[in-house]
Amino acid sequence: MHGFNSCKQNLIFDPGFTFDLILIQETLLANESMIKDLSPRWLGPSFWSPSLGRQGGLTILIKENFDANVISWVKDSCGHVLSLLLQVANTCVNIINKYAPTDLTERKVFFENLHDFFLPADHYVIGGDFNCYESDLDKFGSNVSIAQYLSVFKSTFSLVDIWRK
């Protein structure tokens, strides 16, 4: 989602949708007052990481009656990582929403440090925009540059790409 325009807002905040969790990247919202204005449109808890400049900005929206408790949450200072620890029944789940930088050098450093936002949990769910590809199957058109550091990241933390499972 590049920007959080009114059309996208209306779609996301439509009360007819029944999603338990929504992870949004690239909101481009840097202004706290705009976030404060948008938050009440979502009936459940919302967590935001404002953008810095013309990239990033994240939110995690939780359904109003979703049967989970938020234990803690952290964000980075530039709208690239938002990490939420949920207690669901007797299980702790860490939901990590991320928007990886588009600059290759910054992105490599980002993946080297992303684990700093992992909160102690039984399970981890990482969603968002990786801004890189692990396989040529992940990209249509133009040149594909395979990111070995993404494979290393997944292997280091025993992560599974559910799309490829």
Image (cartoon, rainbow, N blue to C red):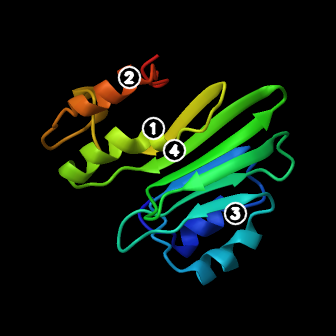
Label 4 or label 3, whichever comes before in sequence order: 3
Image point (54%, 38%), residue name: 118
Which circle marks residue 5 in the picture? Answer: none
From this view, report whether residue 16 is shown above or below residue 87.
Answer: below
From this view, report whether residue 49 is shown above or below residue 71.
Answer: below
Residue 130 occupies quadrant:
top left
Q: Is residue 148 left or right of residue 14?
A: left
Q: Is residue 120 in view? A: yes
Please rate how many residues cluster around mark 3, counting C-alpha atoms within 10 Å: few if below 14, some from 14 to 19, many from 20: some
Q: CA distance from mark 3 to mark 2?
A: 37 Å
Q: Which residue is labeled 3 in the image?
A: 13
Q: Is residue 130 in view? A: no
Q: Residue furthest bottom?
A: 33
From this view, report whether residue 41 is shown above or below residue 15.
Answer: below
Q: Which residue is labeled 2 in the image?
A: 156
Inspect the image, locate mark 2, and give the three-letter code of the amino acid beneath it: Thr
Q: Residue 155 placed where, x, y %? A: 37, 20
The nearer-to-camera label among 1 and 3 is 1
Give the secondary structure at mark 3: loop
| Contact? badges 1 and 2 (CB < 8 Å) | yes
Give the secondary structure at mark 4: helix
Image quadrant in which the N terminus is located: bottom left
Q: Residue furthest top?
A: 165
The nearer-to-camera label among 4 and 3 is 4
Q: Which residue is labeled 4 in the image?
A: 117
Q: Is residue 100 left or right of residue 108?
A: right
